[in-house]
């Protein structure tokens, strides 16, 4: 199976080979970082008068909906010069991206602290940009980090499990990968394959982005360790 991930205006396109890894139809993440990143880019689009493709889950605007793909299975087709890179916080090791043409979230390249999701081999792709759409039984899908949801009472009750944190089965699988699996690839072998070099990032969203997303005690958010730092 070959899928395409494209921004709203079509100036940026990736080719995705094979099937996504982990969490079936992709994690719907409620962590403050993923939600803040989604709102940060959506606000840029609104300010520019652009119609983008948001990474927020359809019908649940307090979660970001991603797909995991192995780095070797991703190929940039066009638009590399339009991929803008940023960090949420100065100390963040993850690099998030959006397009300069229509402010669509495209890829999140996870940092080395994100061992729980095998970041040396996988990146997150905006679910809503991918065609053909990934179809997965709800029993194989998960919402994660629901303990950080801005409005817990509004979490959907639609057959998808609303996990308060990260499912233990997934963490155990990841620990096995770290203990018994292959060593982490270096930056040249992984990150630059899709033209995202984390060492060249200068844009930082910062505290105002968290406040704009609805989080109040920003100082505490910057202290605690996030799942996707």
Image (cartoon, rainbow, N blue to C red):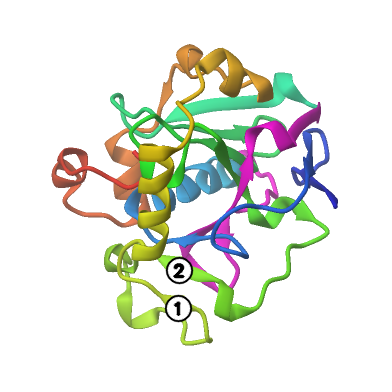
> x, y (%) of residue 57?
56, 65
Residue shown at 56%/33% (left/top)?
A: 97
Quarter of the image for residue 188 reads top right
Dot 2: few (<14), some (14–19), or many (≥20) neighbours within 10 Å?
A: many
Q: Nearer the viewer, residue 64 or 180?
A: 180
Residue shown at 75%/53% (left/top)?
A: 130
Q: Are marks 2 and 1 in contact (CB under 8 Å)?
A: yes
Q: Is residue 196 above or below residue 4?
A: above
> 158 left or right of 173?
right
The residue to which callout 1 is attached is 161
Q: Is residue 152 above or below residue 226?
A: below
Residue shown at 31%/57% (left/top)?
A: 214
The magenta region covers 48-77
> x, y (%) of residue 100?
66, 29
Q: Secondary structure at mark 1?
A: strand
Query: How many numbered discs?
Result: 2
Say whether disc 2 or disc 1 marks the residue closer to the N-terminus. 2
> 53 left or right of 44?
right
- Residue 20 in the magenta stretch? The answer is no
The residue to which callout 2 is attached is 143
């Amino acid at each position: 199976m070959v899928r395409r991930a494209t921004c709203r205006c079509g100036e940026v396109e990736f080719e995705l080979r094979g099937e996504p890894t982990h969490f079936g139809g992709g994690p719907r993440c409620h962590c403050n970082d993923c939600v803040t990143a989604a709102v940060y880019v959506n606000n840029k689009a609104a300010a520019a008068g652009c119609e983008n493709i948001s990474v927020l889950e359809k019908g649940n605007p307090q979660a970001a909906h991603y797909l995991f793909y192995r780095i070797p299975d991703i190929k940039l087709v066009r638009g590399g010069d339009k991929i803008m890179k940023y960090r949420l916080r100065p100390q963040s090791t993850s690099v998030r991206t959006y397009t300069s043409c229509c402010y669509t979230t495209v890829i999140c390249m996870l940092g080395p602290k994100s061992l729980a999701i095998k970041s040396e081999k996988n990146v997150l792709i905006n679910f809503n940009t991918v065609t053909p759409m990934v179809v997965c039984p709800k029993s194989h899908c998960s919402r994660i980090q629901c303990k950080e949801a801005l409005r817990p009472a509004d979490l959907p009750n639609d057959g998808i499990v609303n996990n308060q944190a990260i499912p233990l089965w997934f963490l155990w699988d990841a620990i096995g990968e770290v203990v018994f699996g292959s060593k982490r690839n270096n930056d040249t072998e992984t990150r630059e394959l899709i033209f995202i070099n984390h060492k060249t990032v200068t844009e930082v969203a910062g505290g105002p982005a968290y406040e704009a997303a609805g989080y109040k005690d920003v100082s505490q958010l910057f202290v605690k360790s996030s799942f996707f730092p």
